[in-house]
Image: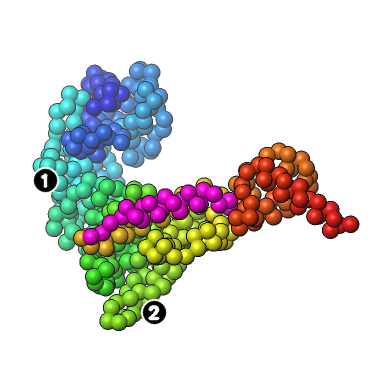
Amino acid sequence: MDQSVRKVLTALNDAGFEAYVVGGSVRDLLMRREPHDYDLTTAARPEEIRRIVAKQGWHTAAIRGERFAVTVLVVDGKVIETATFRGESYGGDSHRPERVWYADSLREDVLRRDFTVNAMAMDKDGHLYDYVNGRNDVKKKRLVTVGEPQRRFREDALRLFRACRFAGQLDFQPVKELQRAMPAAFDRVSGLSLERVVSEIDRLLVTPAAYKGLDILVRSGLGDCSCRQKVNGVYLPVPILPELSHLPQTPQSRPFHAYDAWVHTLAVVAHTPPSLTVRYSALFHDVAKGLLGIRGRHDGRLTDYGHDACGAAMAVDILRRWQKSPDLIRRVSWLVKTHMKFHYFSNTGQGDLHKWLRREAQQGPFKRTAELMEAVEQATALACADIIGCGRAAAETAGTAEFGRFLADLACQMPVSTRDLAYDRRLPSHCGKLTGNCLKNLLLRVQSNELDNDAETLFQAAEKWLKRQEKAET
């Protein structure tokens, strides 16, 4: 246990109050993982906690409302949330409790929590307090609600998404009773905010077993639900992920694919690095497969010509309604749109790579060479995962990875902006107010392979360009 946390527990105990580490940090300690953070629960009330904190010379960062009885401490530079034992009841709100009260015991406090693996407590000496069989569920790697699952989900509909996230984060399997209970709370999802739902999906996507949580999200029908967003004082429904619901029923052409479109998508996600950008690209790379106007048949085989461009447009629509940043939207769209072209270049050895990179530098969503290089590296990761996700026994990615490194080296030499040109101070001193126009000319010539991107070459080319301008004026 972290020594700063132990200090707080000891101070609370010495003042006569029960105090425990509770929740995910206890679970992580049992799994021999380093807790990301520590939450404490105690019999002490907020005013008593503040008095103990002041006596110890610690800092109170914030009081998040007496209603929730949470005090945020900063001890040795570590932020520690300390909550008073509490009970709660739910009403019309889909996420927040209607009533919160101080509880008399640790047992009452933990019995209000979501899943058994998050409802254990530990004292400063490492003694475990487990009223819900959480330790056994950790051992068996299963996700179980505290109490009746339907009731737990209807209390707080965000727990539906937390179940998906914890399946991915912990690599646990939800028990059948939990999964069967989920649809009974779907009507409550409409009261959840878009921000909270998307935050849970973001966190799920970068977990070690994200494919597990995504499979629950889609197959349960949770992705077909809508949450809400407040616009000009009015709540509007926002669809979550209905675009994925057709994929489990979408077969793919054999022998190129061993799986249907959804299992293939999950396999690709599973084999990409835990980058939110790459994982979103993996999730959406085949989202258009099977759709009307895309699904066809050629020589007796199923085809999905144009699914890359259509999928990129669908990814844009999804991420825009989720209020994602323009930079993320542009990059994910580019990766989805490009993934088949990347395979073509890699597998056939055909195509003019320099011409393609020049077009991407001039017309693509990139502002600097570094962005183009990063995108090529992400496209390589997606392509390698796509190959593995096809499920073929002879799948081999070494050649694709090597091609990706070669393409990244080419991208490194392709300036996207005039700021990527390697000119020195001689050039603007010589060109004066015409520097901007000169650099634009040089950028096009370097992109076209007419000039090397080094200071001396650029300066000499600038001198000649300036003389031509002067001659044209006379």
Residue 105 left/right relative to 62 = left
Q: Residue 311's spot in the image, x, y percent? A: 40, 67
User: Which mark is on residue 223?
Assistant: none
What residue lies at 46% left-to-right and 60% top-to-bottom? Answer: 334
Q: What is the three-letter code of the residue carrying label 1?
A: Lys
Q: Nearer the viewer, mark 1 or mark 2?
A: 2
Residue 70 left/right relative to 85 = right
**Marks 1 and 2 close (CB-CB < 8 Å):** no
Residue 86, by quadrant, is top left
- Observer-nearest of 338 and 164: 338
| Secondary structure type for disc 2 | loop
Which stretch is magenta?
A: 394-416
Q: Is residue 385 above or below residue 219?
A: above
Residue 328 left/right relative to 474 = left
Q: Is residue 32 above or below residue 350?
A: above
Q: Residue 171's spot in the image, x, y percent? A: 21, 48
